[in-house]
Image (cartoon, grey):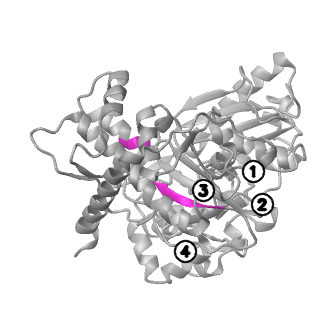
Amino acid sequence: MTEPLILSIDVGTSSVRTLLFDARGQDLDGFGAQIPYDVHTTPDGGAEIDADALAGLVIEAISEAHRQLEPADARPAAVASDTFWHNVLGVGQDGRPVTPVIHLFDTRSAAAAKELERKIDPRAQHARTGCVLHPSYLPAKLVWLAETQPEKFRAARHWMSFGEYLFLRLFGEARASVSMVSGSGLWNQNQNDYDAGILQILPVTRDQLATAGEMDQPCRKLRPEYGSQWPRLDGIPWYPALGDGACNSVGSGCITPDRFALMVGTTGALRAVTETPTIEIPDGLWCYRLDRRRFVLGGALSNGGAVYAWMRRTLVLGRDEEVEAELAKMPPGAHGLTMLPLFAGSRSPTWRADVRAAITGMSLDTRPLDILRASLEAVALRFRNIYDIMTQALGSPAEVVASGGALLHSHAWTQMMADALGHPVFPCLEKEASGRGAALVALERLGAIKQLSELTAKTGTAYQPDPGHGAAYRDYLGRQRRLYAKLFEEN
C-alpha cells in the first residue's frame, strides 16, 4: 500500500459500494463491499427510497470495509464519497426525514415543471443554472411536494440531498458539496451561489438549504455510536459527497475539455470537465460543477443499459455469448427498423418527460435480434445528438473514454458506439470510475497530489469507427430524428 489511503463510498442508483484506494489512485484488492438495492417505483411515475434504509446500507458497507482494515493494520487518511445527483428529501426540526428520498427518475413533477415555465423564462433559467425546468431537478420536485403533500412539506425544516442526510446521521450535522448542489437546478453556475431568480418563485427559503459558505468542508468527529464502531475512521476528514457523474469523469481520466467521458450504466451520459472562470451553456446540454473551479458540461440519457436489459428480459434471445456473436456479425441498419429508445422519457437534448419508446418498420420477417440490434444502435445515436452539441461548444475531442458495465460488457455495442460517434472509443479499465474519482479529489484536497492529471486512468485498446458504416448510421440518425418530430413535435 502506498499511503495516504482513501476509503471511497459510492452510492449509485442501484447499489452502495465501498473501495480503498492508495496514493497512486489504484483500488486495493480485498477491500470494500457492494450492496445492491431497489428503488421503490409507483404506477404514477414515482421513484423513492427510504432515507434511513439507504443510510443503513451505507453504514453496513462501511462496517464491512472497517473490518477489512483491521487485520491489515490500515488507517485511511480520509473518506471520500459520491452519490447520485438530483435527489432530495425533507428533514424535520428534529433531524428525522419527513419524506423519502425523491429519486432523479421520479417523473411525478412533470406538471409542476410546466407550471414553472409559465412563471419564469425557461431559457434564461437554463443559461444561469445549467438545468432545464424538468422533473429530474429540484425546482419541479419541490413545487410538486408542496402541492400534493402539503403536511409533509410544511413539516420539513430543511431540504437536502441524501449525502447531506448521511452526514447528519454520522456526524450530527448535514454537510453539502458545491458539486451536489450544482446539479439541483437551484445553483447559479457562473455566480457560484444559489440562483435568486429560481428561489424567488419556489416555496422554500435559502435558510432551508445547505449554507453556501460551509460547502465542501469536511467533518471529522463521528457521533459516539459510529466512532466506537469505526475507530480507524474517526478523527480523519470525511469530505461531503460529490455528484457521481463528476466523479465518473475524474475517475475515467477525463478532466480536460478535450477528453469526453462516455458512461453507460442503467442510464447514460456524455461529459467533459473544464476549468474556466465562466461558461456559456449550450441549449440541449446541462452544466454542473466538480468544485468551485471546474465545470462539468454534458448531456444525459434516461435510457442506457436499461434498454439492453429490457430487450434481454422481453425478447426471446439465446445465451449471452451467442447473442453477442450474432450482433457483431450484423451490418448496421440492415434490419430496416427505426427506434426511439425512450422507455423512461427523454433528457438531453430535448428534455421531454412525456415521450415514450417507439419502433417502426417491423415485418413478419423481423427477428428478435433485429429489434435488439436496432435498439442498441438507437441508443448510440441518442449519444450522437449530445456529441454533436458538445463538439460545437468544445471542439472535437482528442479521446472518448467509455465506462459502465452495460456498455463495456458488450464488444459489439461498444463498436456500434464508435461507429455512431464517428470517433474512436477507449474502454476505461478502472474497476469503479466514480469511486476512484471521489478518491482522487480527496487526494488533491489533502495535498497528496497537486492536480488530478498526475494520476492517469488505465484504458484499453480503442474501438475504431468503421468508415464503411458511416453512411448507414447517418441514414438511421435522420430517420430517428424524423420519427421523433412526427410523433412528438408536429401537432
Residue indicated by mark 3: 397
Q: Residue at x 55, y 78 (%)?
A: 125
Mark 1 and mark 2 residues within 8 Å of each other at the beta carbon: yes
What span is in magenta?
296-307
Q: Amino acid at mark 3?
A: Pro
Q: What is the quadrant of the N terminus in the image?
A: top right
Q: Relative to 389, is 63 above or below?
A: above
Q: Name the outermost residue toward the left.
A: 364
Residue 33 at x, y percent in the picture: 65, 27
Residue indicated by mark 2: 215
Mark 2 and mark 4 residues within 8 Å of each other at the beta carbon: no
Residue 126 image label: 4
Q: Residue at x 67, y 67 (%)?
A: 208
Of the image marks 4 and 3, the number of the one nearer the N terminus: 4
User: Which quadrant of the structure image shows residue 200?
Assistant: bottom right
**Mark 2 vs mark 4, CA separation in Å:** 23 Å
Of the image marks 4 and 1, the number of the one nearer the N terminus: 4
Side (left or right) of 103 relative to 205: left
Residue 156 at x, y percent in the picture: 60, 62
Q: Amino acid at mark 4?
A: His
In this view of the protein, can residue 300 be seen by the observer? yes
Local SS, label 3: loop
Whether the magenta-drawn stretch holds residue 370 is answered as no
> Is 218 or 294 nearer to us in this picture?
294
